[in-house]
Image: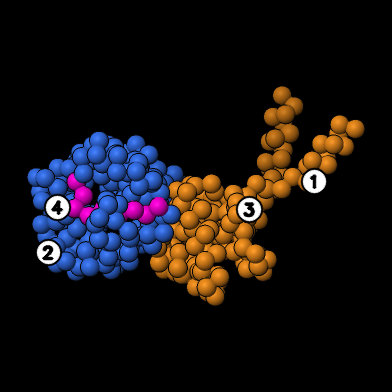
């Protein structure tokens, strides 16, 4: 019994080392706040169009039978700039349907930004007051959702999407979620 | 004089709230409920600030949504449900008691119980140690003779 107690510190060390190794390799992100919308029907979409003369955005866009990407962006947001080429590629090369929503952005600024960088959005809406963002559980921009053809949210990225997200998660989901 | 002034400032120092005067509801009863709720909702971009304390854009939207729900006649619980549906349990500064949070709630008391129990057992054992047997006459004589040398 006495002898067995001496193993205790060693055991504690082993437990901690195991936990740290798991934290390093499992891709666990302690800062992640998760998402409450993944695996549930997409929140409501009812927004004025960003571009002049286009019809308003409605829920029907999310239940077209084809998966869509929903990207919240703003012209004042630097990480949005970083992920923008990936959306251009998704639209042009992979034929993805992307809905862009300008969040807390002046209409003219958002339009100017898209004119400068190129516009990968099939549909674009304006969420000036952030009400739609709140319904979608948005914490800021950029954030990106993948909604399958039945209108269920499948993926939710907080922050800019990366090449790796695109190849390992978005493209397979676009192909799989019909 | 200076000390008196410092003390006075200390007494009248209020915590800084991010709530903007333009956000405040005209009905003081509703506003005080909104403050109560705002204090227990976590701002989703600042890790450990309530939405009442945070200047983040999202926190402001959340404060406005809380007030809109209250004006629409929602009970407090319904307002919390509204936020949890959008941001998950993360948004609650007071985590709910359920299977996933069992360790969080019971971990502390459990450690206290285990450590306290171990200490108690150790203390009992120490008391049980018998004092060494007194020296016999023979041993005492030997000790005396050795000390004399």
Q: CA distance from mark 1 to mark 3?
A: 23 Å
What is the magenta range?
A120-128
Which residue is located at x 49 percent, y 47 percent? B56
Q: Which one is in front, A126 or B94?
A: A126
Query: Seen in the image, is B4 located left or right of residue B14?
Result: right
As drawn, B78 above or below A142: below
Determine the secondary structure under disc 1: helix
Chain appearing in orange on the rendered image = B
Q: Are marks 2 and 1 in contact (CB under 8 Å)?
A: no
Disc 1: which chain? B
Residue B114 visible from this viewpoint = no
Residue A172 horizontal/vertical position (percent): 13, 54
Determine the secondary structure under disc 2: loop
Which residue is located at x 24 percent, y 39 percent? A115
Q: Are marks 2 and 4 in contact (CB under 8 Å)?
A: no
In this figure, which residue is indicated by the disc labeled 3?
Answer: B21
Q: CA distance from mark 2 to mark 1?
A: 64 Å
In this figure, which residue is indicated by the disc labeled 1?
Answer: B11
Chain appearing in blue on the rendered image = A
Which residue is located at x 27 percent, y 65 percent? A58
Q: CA distance from mark 2 to mark 4?
A: 12 Å
Specify few, some or many for label 4: CA neighbours under 10 Å numbering under 14, 14-19, or 20 or more.
Answer: many
């Amino acid at each position: 019994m006495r002898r067995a107690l001496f193993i205790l510190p060693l055991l504690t060390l082993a437990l901690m080392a195991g936990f740290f190794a798991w934290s390093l390799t499992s891709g666990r992100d302690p800062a992640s706040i998760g998402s409450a919308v993944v695996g549930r029907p997409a929140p409501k979409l009812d927004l004025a169009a960003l571009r002049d003369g286009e019809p308003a955005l409605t829920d029907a866009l999310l239940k077209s039978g084809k998966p869509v990407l929903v990207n919240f962006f703003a012209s004042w947001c630097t990480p949005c700039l970083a992920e923008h080429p990936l959306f251009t590629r998704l639209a042009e090369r992979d034929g993805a349907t992307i809905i862009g929503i300008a969040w807390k952005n002046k209409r003219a600024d958002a339009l100017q930004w898209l004119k400068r960088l190129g516009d990968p959005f099939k549909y674009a809406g304006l969420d000036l007051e952030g009400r739609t963002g709140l319904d979608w559980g948005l914490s800021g921009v950029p954030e990106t959702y993948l909604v399958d053809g039945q209108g269920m949210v499948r993926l939710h990225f907080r922050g800019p999407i990366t090449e790796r997200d695109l190849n390992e998660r978005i493209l397979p989901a676009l192909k799989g979620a019909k | 004089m200076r000390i008196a002034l410092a003390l006075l400032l200390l007494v009248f120092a209020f915590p800084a709230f991010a709530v903007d005067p333009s956000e405040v509801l005209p009905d003081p009863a509703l506003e005080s409920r909104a403050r109560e709720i705002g204090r227990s909702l976590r701002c989703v971009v600042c890790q450990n600030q309530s939405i009442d304390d945070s200047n983040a854009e999202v926190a402001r939207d959340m404060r406005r949504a809380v007030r809109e729900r209250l004006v629409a006649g929602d009970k407090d619980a319904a307002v919390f449900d509204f936020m949890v549906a959008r941001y998950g349990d993360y948004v609650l500064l007071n985590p709910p008691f359920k299977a996933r949070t069992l360790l969080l709630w019971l971990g502390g008391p459990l450690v206290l119980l285990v450590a306290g129990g171990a200490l108690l057992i150790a203390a009992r054992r120490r008391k049980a140690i018998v004092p060494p047997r007194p020296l016999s006459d023979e041993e005492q004589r030997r000790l005396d003779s050795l000390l004399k040398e």
